Each structure stands twice: as C-alpha cells, then as structure tokens.
C-alpha cells in the first residue's frame, strides 16, 4: 500500500465501513427509491465514499453505478454536463449490452459504421435508436430541460433493457446551479427539473454530495429545497484519531514511529484524510529511520510552504480586499464575532455581515452560532497564519 492524493478505495479505504454497509444495503434494495445526500467540509473524504461504493457496486450483477463530478465538467455548461453524463452512462452499461466500444469512440466514427456496430447487439430497436441519437452531435440550441430529460431517459431505458437498477452518484451536486446555458447561469431551475424527472423514475436512484453548507441547504437540506426529505442525509466528518493511526500503520511498521509521533499526525492534520495522505507521502519520501514528532511537524511545514501555496494561494488572491482582510483577522483566533471583526478592521457592521455571508457561500468560513464564525478548513487557517501577513 502507499499514500495517494486520489480518492481512496478498497484496502486504502479507512473507517467508513459501517456507513458503506448501510448505504449498500439500502441501494441494493430494489424496492427502495431513496438515495443518499452526503455533506461535509471539503477534503473529508466524500468522493472516496462514492468511489468505494462505485467499486463495490460494479461487481453487483443487478446494479449499474454511474459516477460524475460537477467539478470535472470542463465546458461549465448544462449541455456539457449532460453530454458527459450520457457518455458515462453508455460506458457503464456497455458490458451489460455486450458493447465493446466507448461512447466517445462511437461518436468519432462515421454514423453508419456506428449504427452497424449497434445493429449487431442483441438489444431492442428502440434502445439502439436511443444510443444512436445520444452519440450523434446534438444541436447547440437544445434546451437545458430537454437535455436533462434525455439523460435520464437514457438511464431509465438502459436500466429497463438490462433489468438493472442504476445508481447515479453526482459529486458536488449543488454546483449544477452554476452551470451555464447561453452564457448565463441556469440557477435553481435545474435542481427543480431534476427532481421532477426523478419523480417518475422506476430504475434510477440518485445520490449526491456537497461541500458548502449554504448551497447544500439550498439544494437539498432546506424545507424550501426541491429535494427536501428526498434523501437519507449523512454528515461526513474528518477521521478520528484511531483511524488516522490505522492509516499510517497500514503504510509503515509500528516500530517506525516514536511513541508520540502518531498522536502528532492527528494533531497537525485534524483528521482530514486528504492532508493525512499528503503528509504520509512526504514522510515516505523523507524515509527517516525513526519518525519523530519533529519529522511530523517539519513534514506539515513543508506541505504548507509548497503544496499549500498551490491549494490555497490562487483561491485567496481571487477574493476581494474585504474578504482577504476578514480571513486574515479570523485566522488569528479560533472563532470571531461580527462586532469583533468590524472593530479590528474599522468596517461598518453591514459590510462585515455581507462579506461574511459571501465567504460562507464560497465554503471558506462557517457560522457556528448567531454572530460567531470560524474558518472552515483548519489547515487553510494554518496556511493563512504562516503565509499571509
């Protein structure tokens, strides 16, 4: 085993075993139409949970899992999202259709050749027609509603054709409201449309995740949201101390660590799997004969100075001056009040409140209670203290 910066699965997957079992039992039940909504801070492992479920469900003869992340859509458009999801859907169902070609490859060859390939499959004519239509170049002016309808129609019909249940995992689901059509953001309408389509779905179950509380509330958690009470909701927290120790014991021998070193790993990473994986790579690279607390602290310092700049610097510098100043001020203490920030920065209370709301919407801070805020990612907080004067 080795540390990785990609979502972890299989033997590298740590701690979430009970959650995975519960989700598998629910998703495998053909009579149940409820999916899951996972929410939690960035870099706590939500994607790894989805990827581990996808890995396991691929082995299930009655289920076809389809995974997509909104953050991976390069065109940032509704039709681009739908095109990508169509390709993934065809590719995921391909083994059950005895289709040996990728959807993208079929789209690149002359249509008549692609049609000949599909005609040789032992599937219904209507499904052949549907796949042919899907891989053909779609009109640029196709409406977002029609694009969504066609995506879910494809899933539903392929599921019925193969007698499978389709589990669709959409990572960072709330960000679909930021997708564009004709140069403008689509807004909440796309979430409402998705909900309407899924009301009639017989073979497709949706699971979603989101990292920003305000957008997850808007999309899923609020009583005003289209998907309110349509998911089994799970809060995903950072790993506990014992799970972080277990992760490192799987990659190092116990004798490799000083007594306090494993505790120090949890202390500097705060249980965030992403940062623990990164620290593990640094420790493996440094290859000390005995890993001491000082090695842990130096490794995290190296991360903050090098990789931390890559992760955080651009995002920070894209903020407004007020946002930057407030984050600088907030990084100096565990939590901050609106009045405290206003006083320190000589800002009007209304300006401070408005800026704090914007920072919440960007997933950089969270509201602990009325008028009290903290920086959401403690490692980002550490980076601010060390790099931003």
Image (spheres, rainbow, N blue to C red):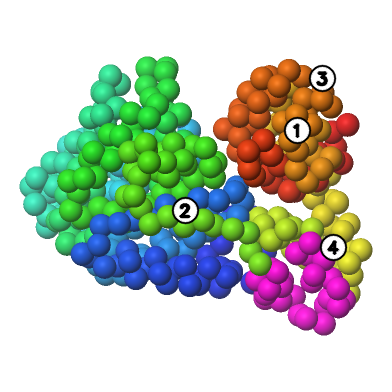
Instruction: Say which of marks 2 and 4 sits in front.
Output: 2
Residue under pointer 4: 296
Lower sequence index among marks 4 and 3: 4
Q: Is residue 280 above or below residue 40?
A: below
Q: Residues within 10 Å of mark 3 (few under 14, many from 20)?
A: few
Q: Residues within 10 Å of mark 1 (few under 14, many from 20)?
A: many
Lower sequence index among marks 2 and 3: 2
Point out residue 77 in the picture as x, y percentages from the top left corner.
Answer: 40, 28
Q: CA distance from mark 4 to mark 1?
A: 26 Å
Asked where in the image residue 324 lies, by quadrant, the reply is top right
Asked where in the image residue 34 lies, by quadrant, the reply is bottom left
Instruction: Say which of marks 4 and 1 sits in front.
Output: 1
Span shown in magenta: 241-267
Q: CA distance from mark 1 to mark 3?
A: 15 Å
Q: Name the residue rendered at 50%, 50% in the picture.
A: 39
Question: Taking 101 as reference, is 252 left or right?
Answer: right
Q: Secondary structure at mark 1?
A: helix
Q: Name the residue rendered at 33%, 32% in the picture.
A: 190
Lower sequence index among marks 2 and 4: 2
Foreground: 325 or 51? Answer: 325
Instruction: Say which of marks 2 and 3 sits in front.
Output: 3
Q: Residues within 10 Å of mark 4 (few under 14, many from 20)?
A: many
Q: CA distance from mark 2 to mark 1?
A: 27 Å
Question: Taking 367 as reference, is 335 left or right?
Answer: right
Lower sequence index among marks 2 and 1: 2
Residue under pointer 1: 327
């Amino acid at each position: 085993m080795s540390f990785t910066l990609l979502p972890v699965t299989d033997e590298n997957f740590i701690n979430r075993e009970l959650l995975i079992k519960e989700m598998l039992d629910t998703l495998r039940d053909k009579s149940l139409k409820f999916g899951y909504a996972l929410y939690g801070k960035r870099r706590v492992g939500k994607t790894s949970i989805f990827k581990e479920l996808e890995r396991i469900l691929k082995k299930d003869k009655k289920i076809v899992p389809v995974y997509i992340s909104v953050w991976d859509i390069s065109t940032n458009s509704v039709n681009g999202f739908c095109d990508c999801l169509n390709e993934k859907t065809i590719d995921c169902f391909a083994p059950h259709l005895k289709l040996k070609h990728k959807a993208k490859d079929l789209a690149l060859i002359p249509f008549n050749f692609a049609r000949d390939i599909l005609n040789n499959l032992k599937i219904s004519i209507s499904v052949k027609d549907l796949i042919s239509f899907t891989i053909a170049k779609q009109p640029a002016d196709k409406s977002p509603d029609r694009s969504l309808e066609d995506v879910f129609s494809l899933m539903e019909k392929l599921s019925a054709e193969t007698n499978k249940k389709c589990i669709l995992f959409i990572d960072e689901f709330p960000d679909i409201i930021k997708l564009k059509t004709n140069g403008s953001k689509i807004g909440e309408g796309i979430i409402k449309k998705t909900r309407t389509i899924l009301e009639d779905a017989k073979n497709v179950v949706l699971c979603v995740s989101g990292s920003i509380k305000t957008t997850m509330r808007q999309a899923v958690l609020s009583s005003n949201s289209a998907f309110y009470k349509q998911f089994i909701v799970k809060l995903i927290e950072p790993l506990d101390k014992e799970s972080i120790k277990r992760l490192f014991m799987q990659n190092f021998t116990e004798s490799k660590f000083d007594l306090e070193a494993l505790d120090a790993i949890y202390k500097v990473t705060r249980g965030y799997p992403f940062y623990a994986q990164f620290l593990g790579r640094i420790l493996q690279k440094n290859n000390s004969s005995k890993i001491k607390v000082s090695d842990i602290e130096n490794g995290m310092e190296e991360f903050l100075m090098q990789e931390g700049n890559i992760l955080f610097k651009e995002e920070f510098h894209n903020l407004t001056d007020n946002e930057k100043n407030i984050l600088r001020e907030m990084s100096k203490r565990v939590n901050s009040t609106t009045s405290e920030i206003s006083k320190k920065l000589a800002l009007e209370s209304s300006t401070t409140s408005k800026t704090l709301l914007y920072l919440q919407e960007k997933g950089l801070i969270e509201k602990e209670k009325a008028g009290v805020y903290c920086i959401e990612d403690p490692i980002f907080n550490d980076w601010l203290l060390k790099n931003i004067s």
